[in-house]
Image (cartoon, rainbow, N blue to C red):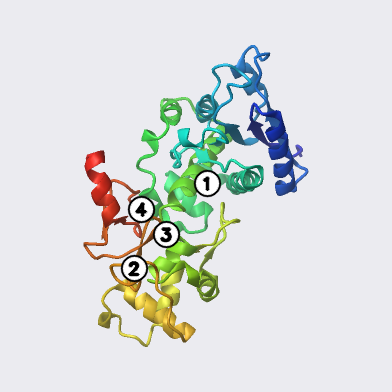
Amino acid sequence: MPAPQTLSVLLVDDNAAFLEQLRSALVQELNDPTVEVRTWQPSNEDQDASTKFDSLLDDGTVLVATDYDLTTGMRGLFGLTIVAWCQQKSIPVGDFSRDNANQLPKEPNLFEFRIPPTEIEGAQFIAAAFRGFREIRRRLEATETLLTKRSLASVLATLLGRASLESQFALYMNRIGASNSSLVQKIKDFTGGVQPSPGEKRKLLVYVLGHVLFNSILKFPGPILSDKVLAAYAATSAAEAEALATLFESARYNGPFAENHRYYWRDDIEKKIDELGAALNAEQFEDTADFNRKVIETALNRPLSNHDCERCGGTRGGFWCPFMVRPVCLRSDCSVAASSWIPQGAQLCRVERQFYDEWAPLLGL
């Protein structure tokens, strides 16, 4: 039986001191001697940056993290180049910026991560992302039949143990092609008669599914809710997170990328609410969020706290605005559906009205 492949993370920075601090913090955060943390400090002595970069990668490279500005070490080299090389190779990549934070958009594209620029927070983020992609990789390796599934959504739903959610996950995947041209070309090659090996197909699935899960499904709530979104769904404030976590412990999501945050399966939450509210008449309530709040208040035997909203006094909700990062409700003066701004599967997302009115004209929406 062949020995298990060594998995690795590659860190790229032109500042030797910070690179070593980040490496040391990541080694401590991973706490796994089987994972190799590689580093590269680009220098003008590296005659060919691309060749040097390629020499540090192999089939076991799970993740790359790079500084945005590498020009102190090598003239003309930026993290954007590293990001592009990784996207061509279907290797997950994240970038950060210590001195040029305003030059990097806060929101990355679908196939990219934005890493906190300090060694401690950065190491925590990198370690969590590494373990998330590694977990997807392990699950695909453990079940070879997943490679024969008819769609990406089917693979992800089965991988997460929620085959019934395939159609919901599929709604998050209709913009993949617009986010990574290298990925589109690779898929075209596969469908054009070039049959990938199981390893190549698995690598591509890990890359696509990991990013869709982390950057889309977990960020724009639909089938999976975070702590704050669960509070919004219950028309209450995030201050109730601990009480809600206890009440909905059976609904916890424990899949990839869950280690630093609490997430919940929406269908399990709804089942629990239906059980707790069996004695209540749902038709007596103004909307679902109003019903959810009353059910939870009855279960906790106390009123829930109100969230910060001047329109309703913080007693309504049911939806989440990912741009304003706050609860919103169906009132026309509170939120807009704005489906072109969010993935179609994000059924619990709406755009806060004032934010939409300000930005929609500028974006031509």
Q: Quadrant of residue 3?
A: top right
Residues at circles 3 and 1 in contact by the CB criterion of under 8 Å: no
Residues at circles 1 and 2 in contact by the CB criterion of under 8 Å: no
Q: Nearer the viewer, residue 360 or 337?
A: 360
The disc labelled 2 sits on which kind of residue?
Gly
Percent of width and height locating residue 65: 60, 35
Q: CA distance from mark 4 to mark 1?
A: 22 Å
Q: Nearer the viewer, residue 78 or 170?
A: 78
The disc labelled 4 sits on which kind of residue?
Gly
Q: CA distance from mark 4 to mark 2?
A: 19 Å
In what element is the residue under mark 2?
Answer: loop
The residue that label 1 is drawn on is 146
The residue that label 4 is drawn on is 345
Q: Nearer the viewer, residue 244 or 120?
A: 120
The structure residue drawn at horizontal position 44% and vertical position 42%, both measured from the top left corner, is: 107
The disc labelled 1 sits on which kind of residue?
Leu
**Viewer-side label of 3, 1:** 3
The residue that label 2 is drawn on is 317
Quarter the C terminus occupies:
top left
Q: Quadrant of residue 250?
A: bottom right
Residues at circles 4 and 2 in contact by the CB criterion of under 8 Å: no
Quarter the N terminus occupies:
top right
**Viewer-side label of 4, 1:** 4
Q: Residues within 10 Å of mark 2 (few under 14, many from 20)?
A: many
**Viewer-side label of 2, 3:** 2
Q: CA distance from mark 3 to mark 1?
A: 21 Å
The residue that label 3 is drawn on is 223
In what element is the residue under mark 3?
Answer: loop
